[in-house]
Amino acid sequence: MKKMCDCIIPFYNEGKKPLYVAEMMSKVRNFSRIIAVDDGSTDTDTYDTLHKQFPQIHLVRLEKNTGKTNAVREGLTYVNAPFVFLADSDLSHINTKEFENAIECISSNQKIDMIILPLVDDLLHKDWFRWYTIFSGQRVLSTTDLRTICQQPISGFQLEAVINDYMIKSRKNSVWMRSLIKHQSKYDKWGNIGGIKKVLSLVGELRQCIGLYGIIKQTLFFCRTKAP
């Protein structure tokens, strides 16, 4: 299998969850390099364990927490492959074959510019309202496109929405591919009150970068075609 893709895994204070993600990503056959970026976690336990257990993974540790977008920017400086796979660090139920299929699909089909892999729970929601187009961190796209996108003045958790906005404005073809992946919800992480505050904060960030119309457009009309 030709290795056409590198993988970036940003993480911040996720405990042991990045270890599982790193283990599963190490089994994906068409990754030429995996880059894990510690975005200034308050302790070094996860970073140290990754270093010991996964010497094949390229590890980067930022001195302070600057947000997911900057962590991805840093990881991107180490990418050499024509495609890059972005993966969140708190995933569960990873099926490596699904990721391999996505990479093979985009690398063999010049008419596809990005593939988003929704969380399986997101696919159970009503088909007409698709939050996953904005909130799903699992996606594969060309390294050139991602570098262009990351030159924009974006920060925090705006990355996925700005990627989508770029794809729309550039008239590029984005499709989705079914997956079984799950992750811990914001409410499980921070409780009901904390989860609500986090969601509101994320929506506020999105309004700053793409506006309310952009949010509506992406959740209702963007990326509605399933990958072949």
Image (spheres, rainbow, N blue to C red):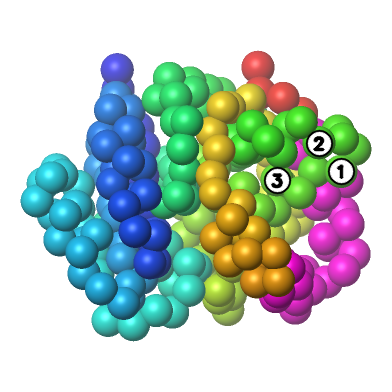
Residue range highlighted in magenta: 196-224
Q: Which residue is mark 2?
A: 125
Assign a secondary structure to mark 1.
loop
Alpha-carbon distance for marks 3 and 1?
9 Å
Please tell me which residue lies in front, 11 or 149. Answer: 11
Q: Main secondary structure of the magenta part?
A: helix
Q: Are marks 2 and 1 in contact (CB under 8 Å)?
A: yes
Residue that appears at 55% across and 74% down = 156
Q: Residue furthest bottom?
A: 64
Question: Which image quarter: residue 214?
Answer: bottom right
Please state if 100 lies on the left or on the right of 1 as rendered.
Answer: right
Give, as a three-letter code, the residue at label 2: His
Q: Which residue is mark 3?
A: 132
- Work out whether residue 169 can be spotted: yes
Give, as a three-letter code, the residue at label 1: Phe
| Above or below for 131 versus 122 | below
Q: Which residue is mark 1?
A: 129
Q: Which mark is residue 53?
A: none
Which image quarter is the N terminus in? top left
Disc number lying in front (2 or 3): 2
Q: Residues within 10 Å of mark 1 (few under 14, many from 20)?
A: some
Disc number lying in front (2 or 1): 2
Assign a secondary structure to mark 2.
loop
Please state if 90 lies on the left or on the right of 49 as rendered.
Answer: right
Label located before the other in sequence (2 or 3): 2
Q: Position of residue 194 (x, y in %)?
A: 65, 71
Question: Which image quarter: residue 209?
Answer: bottom right
Please state if 36 lies on the left or on the right of 55 as rendered.
Answer: right
